[in-house]
Structures are given as C-alpha cells and as structure tokens.
Image (tube, helix red, strand yellow):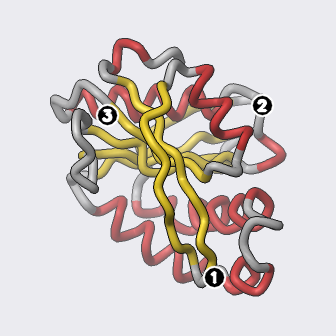
C-alpha cells in the first residue's frame, strides 16, 4: 500500500469531485433528502474544484492510496468573520473505504502547514452537528467547541457546530 498526501493540481478535480459526491451521499443520507443527495453531480463539482484549486488564496490537498485519490482537504482564510480565527479548514472528506487509515489526520496536517505558509496561526472548522463521527475526530485533534449555528442545505435546515484551535500548535495530527 502506497500512501501520500500532496497539493492538488487541476488534473485532480474529477477525482476530488468523485470523493466529494460519494462521501456526501453516504455521510448525509438520512440527514438530507435523498432527492437532494441523488441530484449531486460530479461534473458540477469537478468544475467547482477546478476553480478552487486555481485560486491562489486556497490550499487544496489530496490523499492518494496506490495512486488513486482517496480523500481531500481544503483550507485558507476564515470566510465568515468569526471572532478570534483567521484560518479555516473548509472541507475534509475521505472515501468511506479509506476511512480510519490516517488519511484524515494527514490531510489536516497538510492544511495546517498550508495555513502556516500563509502566515495564519489559528483555525476553525464547521461540521454538521448530527455528524458525531466528524465532531469526535476534531475533538481528538484538540479542537474546542466554539458555537452552533443554523445552516440551510438545499431546502433542509440543519445545524453546524464549529471547533477551533487558537494556535495551530495545538492541532494534534
């Protein structure tokens, strides 16, 4: 088994989109309507990820397992004006078959280094409150609960909770 995490390039957009759509369909089944999840389209997400990867203010990383993208993460400057945080882990998704193999920690480590390269020294992440596995993951990495807010996805009202690290030195990955 050959594993590595590297900075994403434009050629990774389709593979990132595949992981993105697949993980949303499994992770959020039962939380979001099936019709919404089934409507997610890989080509749309591939276009979106090409734009994100091409944006110099965002860092995107992929985890490869035997040469295939098994997960991805992205981060950059905090987007919503949250007090006390300048950096944000925007997304972290690992294919279901590759979970619990250390990819998530490696991807978070890559984002942390990317934020440091951007002269950012803290980080926040938002996670769906009902996603107890993800909340536990961020807690094990040393994230401290910040607050919960409502969010609308499609036509569904959910709640997302934030976890923060006041210093990237406190991220245990």
Q: Is residue 72 visible?
A: no
Residues under labels 3 and 1: Cα distance? Answer: 29 Å
Closer to the N terminus: mark 2 or mark 1? 1
| Residue closer to the observer: 134 or 67 | 134
Mark 1 = which residue? Answer: 41
* Residue 82 x %, y %: 27, 46
What number is the disc on residue 100? Answer: 2
What number is the disc on residue 123? Answer: none
Q: Residue furthest left?
A: 119
Identified at 21% across, 54% down, the residue is 56
* Residue 102 x %, y %: 68, 26
Secondary structure at badge 2 equals loop
Q: Is residue 60 positioned above or below 23 on the image?
A: above
Closer to the N terminus: mark 2 or mark 3? 2
* Residue 157 x %, y %: 59, 72
Identified at 41% across, 42% down, the residue is 89
Mark 3 = which residue? Answer: 114
Identified at 50% across, 66% down, the residue is 151
Identified at 63% across, 37% down, the residue is 135
Quadrant where the image shows the N terminus: top right
Q: Is residue 42 left or right of residue 60?
A: right
* Residue 25 x %, y %: 75, 67
| Total count of labels | 3
Secondary structure at badge 3 equals helix
Residues under labels 2 and 1: Cα distance? Answer: 26 Å
| Residue closer to the observer: 27 or 128 | 128
Q: Do the numbered discs 2 and 3 sit on residues whose CB atoms are within 8 Å?
A: no
Q: Is residue 89 positioned above or below 49 on the image?
A: above
* Structural crowding at the residue carrying mark 3, measured as other residues with C-alpha within 10 Å and reported as few (<14), some (14–19) or many (≥20): many
Residues under labels 2 and 3: Cα distance? Answer: 23 Å
């Amino acid at each position: 088994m050959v594993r590595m995490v590297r900075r994403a390039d434009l050629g990774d957009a389709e593979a990132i989109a595949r992981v993105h759509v697949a993980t949303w369909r499994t992770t959020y089944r039962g939380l979001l309507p099936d019709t919404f999840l089934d409507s997610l389209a890989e080509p749309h997400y591939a276009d979106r990820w090409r734009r994100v990867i091409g944006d110099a203010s965002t860092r995107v990383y992929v985890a490869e397992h035997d040469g295939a993208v098994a997960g991805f993460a992205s981060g950059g400057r905090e987007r919503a004006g949250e007090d006390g945080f300048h950096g944000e882990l925007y997304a972290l998704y690992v294919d279901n078959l590759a979970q619990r193999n250390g990819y998530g920690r490696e991807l978070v480590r890559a984002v942390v280094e990317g934020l440091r390269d951007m002269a950012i020294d803290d980080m926040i992440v938002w996670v769906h409150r009902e996603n107890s596995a993800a909340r536990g993951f961020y807690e094990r990495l040393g994230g401290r609960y910040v607050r919960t807010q409502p969010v609308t996805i499609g036509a569904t009202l959910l709640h997302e909770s934030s976890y923060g690290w006041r210093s990237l030195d406190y991220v245990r990955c």
